[in-house]
Image (spheres, grey):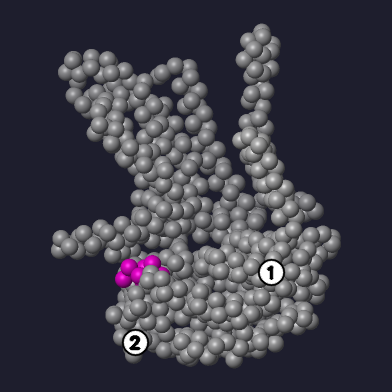
Amino acid sequence: MNRREFLMAGAAAGLVASTRFAAAATRLDLYTASDANISDFFNNVVKPAFEAANPGLELNVVIARPAAALDAVVQRAFAALSTKSDPQLDIIEQYEPMLPNGGIEAGLWTDFQKAGLANYGAVNKLAIQTAYGLPYRGSQVLLAYDSTKLPRDKAPKTFADLAAWIKANPGQFIYNRPDKGGSGGNFINRVVHEVSGRDPLKFKVDNYTQASADEVLAKAWAVLNDLAPSLYEKGAYTSGNSASLQLLAQGAVTMIPAWSDQVLQAIAKGVLPETTGLVQLTDLALCGGFSQAVVPTNAAHRDAALKFADFMLSQEMQTAVIEKLGGFPGVDWSNLPKALHDKYADVIPSSIPTFPSGEWTKAVQDGWYRNVAPNISRT
Amino acid sequence: MIAALRSGMMGGRLSGLLLVALPVALLIWLVLWPVLQAMVGTVYFPGTGFSTASYAYFFTDDYSLRNLWLTLWVTALTSVLRVTVAMPIALYLRFRTGSVAALVQALALFPMFVPSVLVAYAFIRVLGPNGIVDTVLVALHLPKLMSPYLTPAGPIIGLVWDGLPLTLLLLLSGLGRVSIASVDAARDLGAGSWTLFTRIILPRIQSSIIVTLAFNVLGLFSAFTLPFLLGPASPEMMGPYMQRTFSDNADPLNATTQAVITFAFCAAFGLIYVRAIAKGRKGPA
């Protein structure tokens, strides 16, 4: 065989091999609209482990940011349900199963209680909001601060303490724009909770009315506008979760609201120093929640998607959620090694209040831009 | 192909048309058709008829008008700053040669190869609070910088740096038309530098400056990354505002309305550009 024949034979063999692999592997399309730490986790940790454990299955991580891009994908899946066509979507890593309106009634989302997942019994009962979403990881917004400037025993524990601290230390606190990452958004949601009697259950996906929003949000804007002159640069707001972390890391501010998983990862990687303190408000915690994975009933690879969902609940993946992601496990701690529980004891939440997505979130975000963001004094 | 081009007048015309057919078709398909769709879609609603309510809303909504106004003045100021900064460099590069000039040229064109996200993060590291500039100032026992990060000055500084190469290249091509002989002749007659610039050079590059400004305005109007990462939360430039209206508020009608209004402003500058080009074609002014 001369060189030329060898090359041609090699190319032909390669072609056959590649088409055979392409035909053999079932490609699961997983969508995510979460931050880069989550999509990286799926690409770098989950994908290799899942594919090694399930030969013949391939995980394709599709990034659909921002959340509204994912809404469009879900609308497509919903439309595909009525026309009985392929939604080109097998699983969403995190989505509100109550949306789109009428989706559950029409049978869009898979009922996990009846899906026969081997690990479903291990799921933390407190985390299950609906049978149509599978809580596989949680995270919560808390306050991250520089303990060299603010001693750990002086860190605010209630909203009133926090507001007083912000005013007593002008320029040392910043939160990000509510639509550009949930840490700032959930700080604003906490203010909405504060002015409405600290009852998160008052806000539901389906109970938004213009009148109730106008009333409660006007009070929230008043609180936020009162704090604005004491914020960094007398009312500046960063453009995202990581921009806030950067200001804390550069020592430009002393305290920020931050996602527990992002801040734990940042400390682990050395982006934030070991002296970074974490504190949660005790009168009512800042919002957070469990990420609910959803699987459309009309997914082309629904069985494989359910296999994947089960895999995410395995001890291996739940440990990875804690250790690699800095998140909370979706399964009950009793199913995980005790050493792990002890190591992360100080960030294990006692309660995780939530704020509904959909109309309420839209009203809070756009209202904030119109009523709070412009009030900045440069003098 | 070459043979076809030479095969006579008619054939030449036909292949000429064929050559431009692809770009023209792409222009119609990807630009003109969506624009038309957007314009019709914001005023005509199947089933309910014509309505200009979304435009009325935009032009009576203080918040939207503030955003438009900010976009206009950031665009104007940044365009003028870019030309002001690029002009001395262009003059230097036109009339000087050697290794120093080559170095200046390389440095001035460098931003062209840097993605704007990197520009933004580099900016935060250097000019941001407790950034490199602050570190140097503190080491020299000087007060810290009033950081432009998250203020309206932030995106302007970023955009000027980011857009410098294109401005410089356009001005340089204009300056190519100024002959060194005419400059030398004027200098022999005793013209000073300022007179030389205003009487000899400027008249020759007038149309280049207009083209440069028009190009800058078109790019700046749709600026997104730098205003979003470096600027204040509000007022927003039209780029981030449109994106937010479309995706966060899930309000395609108002987002499209904002886009059509933005397009109208850009089209006006496009017209100025086309006229400048046409004037240039007829011969130097």
Q: Residue A343 at x, y = what percent?
A: 46, 87
Residue position for label 2 = A152
Residue A301 falls in image quadrant: bottom right
Q: Give the Cα separation between the discs numbered 2 and 1.
A: 47 Å
Disc assigned to residue A54: 1
Say whether residue A101 is left or right of residue B162. right
The quarter of the rendered structure image containing the N terminus of chain B is top right
The residue mark sitting in front, 2 or 1, is 1
Q: Residue at x 30, y 27 (%)?
A: B94
Please tell me which of labels 2 and 1 falls first in the chain. Answer: 1
Residue range (magenta): A245-251
Q: Is residue A303 visible?
A: yes
Residue A131 falls in image quadrant: bottom right
**SS under mark 1:** loop
Instruction: Please name the amino acid that badge 1 sits on.
Output: Asn
**SS under mark 2:** helix
Disc assigned to residue A63: none
Chain name for mark 1: A
The quarter of the rendered structure image containing the C terminus of chain B is top left
